[in-house]
Image: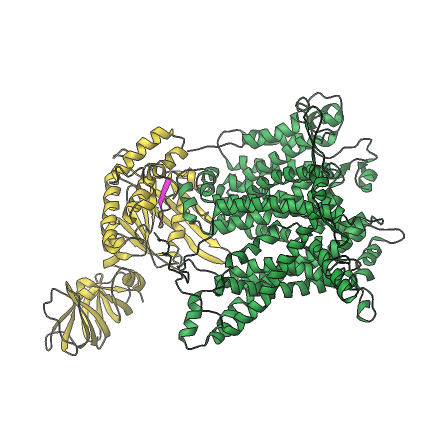
Chain colours: A green, B yellow
Amino acid sequence: MRRTSSLLPWLLAALGTLVVPWHMQQDGVTLSGVFALGREDAEAASALWQAAAHGRFWFWPVVAALALALPAALPQGRSARQARVLAVAGGLGLLAIVLQGLAIGVQGWSWPWLADTFGELNDRQFGIGLGGTLAMLGFLFLLTDGLARRGLFKGDRFVSGAVGLLAGSIIVFTAWPVLTMLSQMFTPRESLSWSGALLDRVMDRKIWGLACTTANVNCGVFWNTLMLATASATAATALGLSFALIATRTGFKAKKALRLLTVLPIITPPFVIGLGLILIFGRSGVVNQLADSIFGVQLGRWIYGFGGVWLAQVFSFTPTAFLVLIGVVEGISPSMEEASTTLRASRMRTFRAVTLPLMLPGLANAWLVVFVESLADFGNPIVLGGSFGVLSTEIFFAVVGAQQDFGRAAALAGVMLMVALVAFILQRKVVGRRSYVSMTGKGDVGLHVALPDGVRRAAFAVALPWAFLTIVVYLMALAGAFVKVWGRDWTPTLEHFRRAFALEWTVDGALIFAGGAWHSLWTTISLAAIAAPITAALGLLAAWVLARQTFRGRTTLEFALMLTFAVPGTVIGVAYILTYNIPPLEITGTAVILVACFVFRNLPVGVRSGVAAMSQLDKSLDEAAVTLRASTFRTLRTVVLPLLKPAIVTALVYAFVRAMTTVSAVIFLVSAEYEMATVFIINRVINGDYGLAIAYCAVLIVLMMAAIGLIQLLVGRRRLGRRSAAGATPAGAHT
Amino acid sequence: MSASQTGAEVRLIGIGKRYGKVTAVKPLDLTIEGGTLVTLLGPSGCGKTTLLRMIAGLEQPTEGRLLIGDEDMTLLSAGERNVSMVFQSYALFPHMSVLDNVAYGLVSSGLRRRDAQEKAEAALETVGLKGFGARLPSELSGGQQQRVAVARALVLQPRVLLFDEPLSNLDARLRRSMREEIRALQQRLGLTVVYVTHDQSEALAVSDRIVVMRNAEIAQAGTPEELYAQPESVFVATFMGEANHLRGTIERVENGMASVALDALRFALPARGLPPGPVDVVARPEAIRLAAEGAEGMAGRITRATYMGSHAEYVVSTPLGELFVIAPRQRTLLPKGSAVAVMLDVEGVVIVRP
């Protein structure tokens, strides 16, 4: 029988507490700086040394918790008392770290009442670094080990540790920042008390104003956002449904090309569509120029405002709705429709009475998905919005503008968060009721009934022109990279690419990346490459824990995780700068904050592909491995992971690609040293330098198409055990 | 593996499982003697699989304790219990060869790969699959996959071997021979086996003891003979085989024998501690004798007659209601509508508490 001890997490905690420098080092931890006992400089010393030699008494509780845990962590026996001591010591250690971190900041005590109680503290500390992080992890795993030994999580220390890690990261990287941000709404300002300040901020006329109903002025941003999201969601859902019906229910020849549409939103940087629209309908756009020269009509700048943003969002999100609705349309069991036709219903009646009602929850889901995307969208409104403000852009201007009003940003973000949460809850209800459409494990061998003629014609009439327009927009957007000045000087040129990606050689032959875009491109690629494996690993771990383990609090964890996915990027961005600007976790301006942002923004990608893949894996495979004495980790490594390879690849590549195209949260977090490609582009757009921006976008698109091609190559297409209309494929043998 | 090794005793003490408000297994006590094969039998949803999975360590009981040998295993994880399980779907790892599948548990336990593979070869030989080691599970037939699953569980010399409906994916003929193989292997190696099934004939064929479960609790436990011949409830009687459920009256009890009135018929049956008064009577179909009209017994009329080859089945309408009758070795089928005399053989009749 295996008797495993908890020595490993204890050593981790000990390393973090005793040996390694506790705080973040100005120039990173060097090899010589790792051993931090006996340091003259308190900031470079380990927690133990800071407590012993520099009078930083607040580290003694951490050291005490470590000492308390030692006897219980040793490999001998496994009494119930040991388990309790382990859990208590781990919990105390965590608590001690968190409390000291929050209580003592760069100016001594963080809260006035502490100074009143204990007197002024003539000391201070910066954000935690390597030592603090290791110690926290160590104590966390001591706690989860103790809980597992007490019989929680079926006594499985790995699962317990995984759940602890997930819960911990949700708290540190989502719950805490969001709560910190919300608390900013209460910060008193000028003559107002906290409640007055709150009311003033939240009840702002700029948010809720309804003046536009009576006069020709803009409404409050809340109404703008709501109107825009509703209009975009409705249009995109209708278009998406048309595409989905054509792709799955008709003999349309270019179905494969249609499916290509689904990858567009993933590889498109968020403002390519906006740029394309400007190049067509903008003041010096193609349409405006033609109208001017042929009819002598000035079309003006209508594209900047609600209409333009709406158009761009519909272009951007129709593929998303299409993707959701393909699954919905395919998921309807053909035997239902066959049953209907054998019951003498016409095709039209079958469509109206069976197909459509079965799709309704799916349609509602697609609508809500687009609604949330539109709500969180930053790229299109910033490029095309003009004076038409929505929540995400108002938040941005509140933070970066001349006002620097974090309270206002927090209030706006709070409103946005509420809308997103309402949509999220509605969506969960809708999807929860969807179960009767979902596919069963039984091979369903029917054929879908052909669409009624009227519906088919309507679908084609809507979808084909739109597909054509989409292509035109993309082509225009790309063409913009190859002419000198759009609308004025149509000379073909590669000048924009040269400015962005020029390479030069010094006299002695060394390569210089002279183009202005190289720096941000490398930063983006390397940070995305760092974030992708972490995202995939954490996401798959979460998927595995949620799909395969049962423990108390599983539904809570799942809900919390899904909730974090519902937080719009702009909110996360504001929350991160507000929280991580100051100790205990002072990571603003570093690469860490960007990587953390990528990981937690893109975690759903990993979780979803993991859950989808795992639902196709027989659960008794893992159970078999566990009863065959494989540790949970070995089960994961030798059985689950090899069978999940496609999901891993998918998660990795999508996490990478999405990290490269995201802008909403990142725009708040970049620094001179760590500038991201998308932010670089948007700054060019704001300066009116469209050529370079588009050239850069083109390069990004090509890069990401390569990445997507890689997935398609490695993973292949999903197969459903159904006959296709063209020729019967043998149903998968079931053993 | 050593043939003399004997499996360990398993004791469940007050063990129970609740999922929120739903009770999957009500707290129950059960002792499974070392070296015996005990079947958990019951309709789907009765809690038998949950009970098995709690023994395996795949589910955590919400109350009670589990002892294997003398060791308390309640809080240990599945891998720490020295228990192996054969799954309904076999759960062979599709990406590993048969040999790697069988060696998997040994490698997990820390054996060197070469030693593990040697032992795995031996285990494959035990189940008659020598030379199949290099294949993938998908290249084997259903019966062969089943044997690999058994070999994979056996090679660890578990103290308890668990089977979760192991034969339900096989066709009827193969099912019969596999269950005999499992029984033979269990007896040869002296294994403690807990075996879950919903098929009563499978349970009767392989078990030392059968535990019949119903509604998350044990309805009755005993040897196959006890359960078939002396069911304690109508449920157990009907679940263990075809049975006619009749209502009668105990007129009096003398020396442990009850005299039971069934319409006009009178029987002396073991009283089984039941007092005079109304009682349920269970009569096996093969205990009902049909004779020509006018012979001793109740008058009856055949309402359905089915020829089954080795025997004939009848439904007979009598004053007691419709009776299901199995008549062995009957060359000619009695035609539907014929009048018969119906007599009960006390050997196949038992009274149970109403």
Question: Residue A180 at what x, y percent from top left?
Answer: 74, 47
As drawn, A355 above or below A616? below
Q: Taking the image as drawn, is residue A95 in sight?
A: no
Q: Please, what is the dominant secondary structure of the magenta stretch?
A: strand
* Image quadrant in which you'd find residue A624: top left
Nearer to us in this view, A619 or B336 = A619
Question: Residue A83 at what x, y percent from top left?
Answer: 54, 37
Horizontal arrangement in the rendering, residue B161 relative to residue A259 (left or right): left
Question: Residue A549 at what x, y percent from top left?
Answer: 49, 47
Give me the residue at 38% from left, 44% from top. Answer: B94
Let me know if residue A309 is in the magenta part.
no
Give me the residue at 53% from left, 49% from top. Answer: A609
Give me the residue at 84% from left, 34% from top. Answer: A120
- Span colored in magenta: B83-87
Nearer to us in this view, A278 or A18 = A278
Q: In which quarter of the image is the N terminus of chain A?
A: top left
Nearer to us in this view, B3 or A174 = A174
